[in-house]
Image: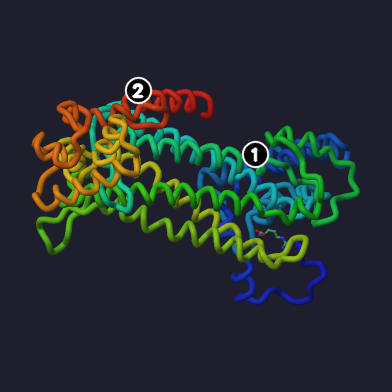
Amino acid sequence: MKLWGGRFEKGTDELVNDFNSSIRFDKRMYKQDILGSVAHATMLGNCGVITKEESELIVKTLYIILEEIENGKAEFLIDAEDIHMNIETMLIAKIGDTGKKLHTGRSRNDQVALDIRMYLRDEIDEILIMIKNLLLSLSKIAGDNLETIMPGYTHLQKAQPITLAHHICAYIEMFSRDTLRLKDTRKRMNIMPLGSGALAATTYPFDREFVAEKLSFDDITYNSLDGVSDRDFVIELAGSLSIIMMHLSRFCEELILWNTNEFSFVEMDDSCSTGSSIMPQKKNPDVAELIRGKVGRVYGDLMSILTTMKGIPLAYNKDMQEDKECIFDAVDTVKLCLPVFTKMLDTMKLNKENMLKGASGGFTNATDVADYLVRKNIPFRQAHEIVGKMVLYATKTNKALDEFTMEEFKNCSNKIEDDIYEAINLKTCVEGRKIIGGPAKDAVLKTLDKCKTFIEKEF
Ligand code: ARG
């Protein structure tokens, strides 16, 4: 019989039973469910709702069940519907009537609200470690490439010279924000809902603070309806994970481009590439493409949870069971992508010469020629126009700006002198941009320094 079977005259239809059951996906919360029950049972004993002996027996048996599950000795039953009732059923099977006292003053509604919070905060902690490792890898690559000149792009057109370190630091900033976003999400998630009961709390004199402290929560919920029906934190996490995936995907898109024959800025290691079943020459950046592709599922998970929640009246409704598969999928996907992405970065080969070559064509120093003219007292707008004409001439004669003869420069502006060559070489262009946030070596070192402090402080 079902744990809730008292008021029923008929058994559940088999189709309905399967449809309703969530055990196949919520069994992963077994540990959180057990630890939550341990805290609840201990509190019941402390408050005198059950005897100390009963409380101790329940706690001891819950730990035995935990061990059995971890050793693959426990069997989950579709019939017992979800992880909460599966574990309660196991408990009752072991200790009979005493086990039947565990659920006093508790509902699966506040129980699942507790479990999912505990489960997701653990997942956040694991993801944070993965992001830390990624930040360390990025810092290493940046630190090794402070003078590796490459083109910076706008509209995917060569724009101005930067360094690889500078480009990588952009992602360091993104993943640092992702770190803070996750930590912030965790803060709002880490509030203890037990005591909310089914919706209207409980008449028992529970010590909610004790349970919160025992389970390492920062606070308790202050409205029982909200305590059981809030899934903001699930949505927020799906949002934070979507942003992480978006960042990974942008980077992957760049790496796929950089890995092409046409760019050839990087070469993916054999260990992180795959071949073609028909074209023998192929070495494809599948890892980067798959990560780019998997963003779709995480965005889908976010949309799915948002949509599920939007029409649910207070408080708990079964619709909310649908949050789990989505957020589990989002978490699993991010956990799958982060380490493999880091591995791909760590192993890829950098073609620094091609990066420099890429920065050399395409007039990436045109702004610097204009700035040179500004230093010779020509107003910027006018300088812009002069350089525009120079580019037109260079395009027609198939030259780079730094390949102009002095005579050609003079034809464009008589203010130009010999020092132009030094002023517009790529190294000067990069090194001149030394304000904080710029690509010059010292500026990037400051950014990297900030990253180091960030890692020490936030992880
Ligand atoms: N499996 C359910 C869920 O994930 C647990 C809560 C069930 N509560 C209920 N009143 N049916 O949402």
Q: CA distance from mark 2 to mark 1?
A: 36 Å
Residue at which label 2 appears: 442
Residue at 76% over, 36% down: 56
Q: Nearer the viewer, mark 2 or mark 1?
A: 2
The front one of 258 and 48 is: 258
Q: Is mark 2 within 8 Å of ligand 1?
A: no
Residue at 87% over, 50% down: 202
Task: Name above or below for residue 455 compared with residue 225.
Answer: above
> Based on the displayed image, in which of its 4 quarters is residue 39 positioned?
top right
Q: Quadrant of the N terminus?
A: bottom right
- Relative placement, left or right, of 457 versus 134 is right
Residue at which label 1 appears: 187
What amino acid type should be assigned to the residue bearing mark 2? Asp
Task: Name above or below for residue 264 compared with residue 18.
Answer: above
Label drawn at residue 219: none
Quadrant containing ligand 1: bottom right
> How many other residues sit within 10 Å of disc 2, few (<14), some (14-19) or many (≥20)?
some
**Element assignment for label 2:** helix
Q: State whether residue 322 appears in this view.
A: yes
Residue at 66% over, 52% down: 232
How far from the left and from the top, in percent, is residue 218?
71, 35
The front one of 452 and 288 is: 452
Task: Name above or below for residue 5 compared with residue 454.
Answer: below
